[in-house]
Image (spheres, rainbow, N blue to C red):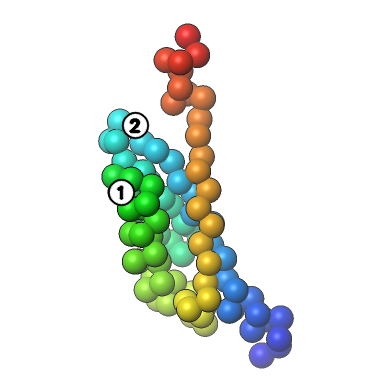
Amino acid sequence: MSQITEAKRQNAMFHVSVIYDSEADKWVGVCDALPVATEADTWDELVERFWAIAPEIAQANKPGIDVGTMRLRFEYEDCALDHQHALV
């Protein structure tokens, strides 16, 4: 295995899209690349929950991933439609 391929395996980063669902009063995180989707009452609980399940799912769906060095990037997405009442 090449050094570049080995480095990519060891430094795998996955992007987690996060939204706040105001109707459900939940934080929702989705990572299509793993795939993982989960929700929680708070941002901190969402991050903790994601880390609790992501390594196992990564091992099952991404053979060769070193879960000991994998990284997750949580990106919060917001939409003007969610703030429509504030814009009026």
Residue 61 seen: no
Number of marks drawn: 2
Q: Is residue 39 above or below residue 62?
A: above
The residue beneath circle 2 is: 22
> Residue at 71% across / 81% down in the picture?
4
In the rendered view, does 85 fall on the left or right side of 26?
right
Which quadrant is the N terminus positioned in?
bottom right
In the rendered view, does 46 fall on the left or right side of 71?
left
In the rendered view, does 39 fall on the left or right side of 33?
left
> Residue at 57% across / 71% down in the picture?
12
Residue 5 seen: yes
Q: CA distance from mark 1 to mark 2?
A: 12 Å
Q: Residue 46: where, in percent of width, then height?
A: 36, 52
Q: Is residue 58 above or below residue 33?
A: below
Q: Residue 10: where, in percent of width, then height?
A: 58, 79
Q: Which amino acid type is shown beneath numbered disc 1?
A: Ala
Mark 1 or 2, nearer chain start: 2
Q: Is residue 45 above or below residue 83?
A: below
Q: Is residue 83 above or below residue 12?
A: above
Location of residue 24 (image quadrant): top left
Q: Which amino acid type is shown beneath numbered disc 2?
A: Ser
The residue beneath circle 1 is: 40
Element type at mark 2: loop
In the image, 60 versus 71, the foreground residue is 71
Quick one: which residue is furthest to the bottom in this view? 1
